[in-house]
Amino acid sequence: MKLRSLFILLVLLSSNSIMAQRYAISKGSIMIGGAAGYTSTSAEGSDTSTSQLTISPELNCFVANNFFLGGGIDLKYQSQGDFGNTSMGIGPQIGAAFGNEYSQVFPFIKLGARYYKETFDKSSIEQNTNVSGNDIFFGGGVIIPAREHLGITIEAGYHMMDFSTEDSDRSLGINQFEIKIGFAGLLF
């Protein structure tokens, strides 16, 4: 009898919390999304080309109406001739999305940080070079609902990065502006 009562109580409590999410950016909603890109560059008069593949998944949970906490991963691979570069960044982010249950689009802003680990390799040398660093970024964009629980994202951001090699005291600061197009799965 106790087990049955506990089961009924859990069903009632979970159904109440599931029904509490009224729209895409209300408290308790989850946004799963990301962007991917591929770039191939070649120069006239050169037989070497550069290729880059980027994948950036994110998971954000709305802790209050219109406010989310989450995190993301940035995976990148770049090659040019016998030179290659692989990097992975991971870290938290916070943000705010604007709108209500009647909104046709959801503008958003976010702030976050990533810790990066990067490996440079060149087949003509015996040793790889490892680089690590931090990225603090801010940006904004818009989620355009395409279906009830799926949206297209367009966003722009500014990154302030600081990298250093593991075997020296040298440091490199990089400022980067980016524009991304991706998707968002909206669970509410």
Image (spheres, rainbow, N blue to C red):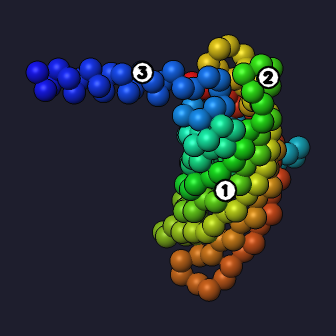
Distance from disc 1 to disc 3, alpha carbons, whole Å, reads 33 Å
Decide if residue 156 is on the left or right side of residue 80: right
Q: Residue at x 65, y 51 (%)?
A: 94
Nearer-the-camera pick, 78 or 153: 153
Nearer-the-camera pick, 80 or 187: 187
Distance from disc 2 to disc 3, alpha carbons, whole Å, reads 25 Å
Q: Amino acid at mark 1?
A: Gly
Report the residue marked by disc 2: 103
Q: Secondary structure at mark 1?
A: strand
- Residue 2: percent from the left, percent from the top? 13, 26
Q: Amino acid at mark 2?
A: Ser
Report the residue marked by disc 1: 112
Decide if residue 2 is on the left or right side of residue 71: left
The disc at residue 15 is 3
Q: Amino acid at mark 3?
A: Ser
Decide if residue 40 is on the left or right side of residue 54: right
- Specify whether residue 156 is in view: yes
Q: Residue at x 57, y 31 (%)?
A: 29
